[in-house]
Image (spheres, rainbow, N blue to C red):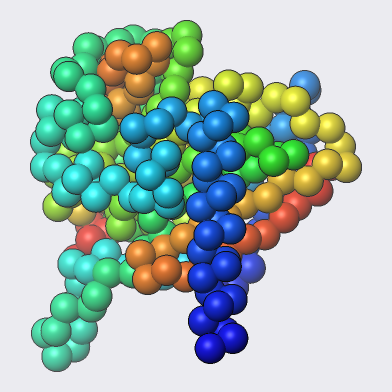
Amino acid sequence: MADPMKIRAAMSGDKVEVKILMSHEMETGQRKDAKGAAIPAHFIQTVSATHNGKVVLAAEWGPAVSKNPFLSFKFTGGKPGEKVSVTWVDNKGDKRTDEATIS
Amino acid sequence: MNSRRRQVLQGTGGMAVMGLAVAAGLFKPGSAWAQGAAWNKAAFDTRNMNDTVKALGGAGATESKDIVINSPDIAENGAVVPFTISSKLPKTQQIALLVEKNPNMLVANFSIPDGTEAGVTTRAKMGQTSNVVALVKADGKFYYTTKEVKVTLGGCGG
């Protein structure tokens, strides 16, 4: 199981600003190890963020997203104290879900 | 036996949630998202913008000044290039980031539901100096804007 995500969700005016830092290798499959063998690709493919059961952002990623990916966006309709939940799934089927409370 | 049953149950549970999401109109049937946790492999295999647009379900894209790419003009480290893409186009549904000279162009594709601001920030790898394309689907049509980002140290090789 991968390390937890760091999620911040804070009010910014009438919007909720969500910042997510995930912990993931994001191996492209293009690199080679010391022996010249290709390192297999390992990267997050889908990300979704939900608030009160409603998807507020969905994403599909390729291997070109940086290692330990950062993602930030804003949505309307959130209130302090409510929760934002983020899930990612990688190409090996690993997944992780974390939650943050809107402040 | 028992653990296998559990896996099957989990699997169906996930599908049911996805089904509900479709029923609620969150995902349009036919989009990659409606087909379960599918990942649009075809789109991520494309090597030029027209193919990417086609793989995402469009037919050609128009250049637009209402899309803004905010990124450094010169990136010292190609492994971590920050990008903020925002769109002022009404009814923005999707924002995609493409790097022309990467082995595969498409970096990320974001679906923007109603109520979410049409702007995302993320970080991407760039193999070399290249044009970066922000592709936006708004009201069913595709629009794009480009920007050159110079890279002094590539982020794709070993």
Residue shown at the point (24%, 27%) measured from the top left:
B57
Report the side of A88 relative to B105 (left or right). Answer: right
Give percent across and percent down for residue B79: 33, 57
Residue B129 appears anywhere in the view:
no
Question: What's the residue at 16%, 78% (across, down)?
Answer: A38
- Residue B2 as seen in the image, left or right of residue B27: right
Residue at the limit of the structure toward the right, as seen here: A81
Identify the image quadrant of the C terminus of chain B: bottom left
Q: Nearer the viewer, residue A72 or B158?
A: A72
Instruction: Give the residue at x 30% y 57%.
Output: A63
Where, by quadrant of the figure, is residue B77 drawn?
bottom left
Residue A41, how many percent across, how many down?
27, 69
Q: Say if B110 sits above or below B88 in the image.
A: below
Quadrant of the rendered image containing residue A72 = top right
B3 or B72: nearer the eye?
Answer: B3
Specify whether B92 is left or right of B131. Answer: right
Q: Is residue B8 left or right of residue B107?
A: right
**A37 is higher (above) or lower (below) than B139:** below
Could you tell me residue A16's position as x and y percent? Answer: 72, 32
**In which quarter of the view is residue B23 placed?**
top right
> For this rendering, which residue is in front, A31 or B46?
B46
Number of marks: 0
Between A49 and A64, the one lying in front of the other is: A49
Residue plotted at (34% across, 69% down): A42
- Is any part of residue B89 visible from this angle? yes
> Compared to B125, does A11 lie above or below?
above
Q: Is residue B131 above or below residue A25?
A: above
Residue B30: horizontal and vertical position, in percent?
Answer: 34, 32
